[in-house]
Image (tube, helix red, strand yellow):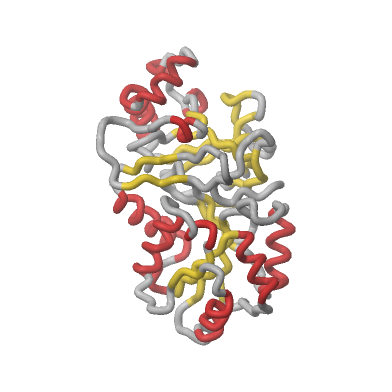
Amino acid sequence: MKKLPFRLFHFQAEHNAVYRQYLHHLNCQTEQIDSIAQIPFLPIEFFKSQKVKSGIWHPEAEFTSSGTSGQATSKHEVFNLSFYLKLAEQIFTNFYGPITDYHLLALLPSYLERTGSSLIAMIDHLIRESKSEHSGFYLHNHDELVEKISFLKNSNRKVILWGVSFALLDLTESHELDLNSCIVMETGGMKGRRKEWIREELHTFLCNRFNVKTIHSEYGMTELMSQAYSKGNGYYQCPPWMKVLVRDINDPFTTQIGRAGGIKIIDLANFHSCAFIETQDLGIMAQKGNFEVLGRFDNSDLRGCNLLVG
């Protein structure tokens, strides 16, 4: 596993035209790179204007990011959709156990209202694999969602309410709910529908309104194949093939622990595009490899999952 990132880097440095040109622009001597810290990470903005592909192949799917009117959106061509879906299920299972142990209720209006969402593809797969007739999507039909939650309160399965942040807030305004027997999974930020909240304030508010001890979170984005999860302490954990680094804000090649900086992601499952992505998210690395998401750089567009302002 330790050698795999370097093998993949050298492969993509040769066979990914966009990444190859970027490395050339940096005057990167790829044959001399022998540590993770030396690898240049591709700025995520390239997905908005270029086809970031390693090799020549025809995509089975194309994921697109959300964006307000006039914003450029990212496009991620996916070599094998089944691989993405099975990988997402495996990651979920690693953190939460078999999906068949759950009823999954998805409150994701901003994602359902457009096409090309990787999150909707993942949740749709998890819903189907849950083998539960009660799992499903909800748009703005809060009354039906509340009735379903009440009906499932005494079920022998656990209930996950998976919602985009602004929709969860909308739900607290329309209904009083006691979700102490449920997992509340927050993702997606406000999507321009509401003013952004500090994560601690949002989670504290939702805990009080839903009568739960913690709010769980999922961190993923259009340009990746893998997801990270937080079980309520604000720090995310990655699957073994995904690694997060935090760079100095003024120096993309200097990584740091314990101080805020730009999040860089190694996702080895991105073998078909680029496994080394420099995001526009701000975060802090913990000693054990976990990370916290603080928000975004001031000059970046609102996009992706879990974009809460710190």
User: Measuring 61% from the left and 48% from the top, which residue is drawn there?
Assistant: 307
> Which residue lies at the image location 29% right of the left edge and 42% below the top edge?
59
The foreground one among 36 and 100 is 100
Q: Nearer the viewer, residue 205 or 255?
A: 205
- The answer to whether residue 221 is above or below residue 212 is above
Visible in this render: residue 288? Answer: no
Q: Which of the image's four quarters has the N terminus? A: top left
State the image coordinates of residue 283 (x, y, percent, origin top left): 64, 41
For this view, does 276 lie left or right of residue 296?
A: left
Residue 207: x %, y % from top left: 69, 68
Q: Say if 55 sits above or below 293 in the image.
A: above
Residue 74 visible in the current orientation = yes
Q: Report which quarter residue 78 is drawn in.
A: top left
Q: Which residue lies at the image location 33% right of the left edge and 56% below the top edge?
A: 86
**As rendered, which of 35 and 266 lies closer to the eye?**
266
- Residue sitting nearer the eye, 142 or 212: 142
Coordinates of residue 5 in the picture (x, y in percent): 39, 33
Give the residue at the far left of this rendering.
Answer: 57
Q: Relative to 36, is 271 above or below?
A: below
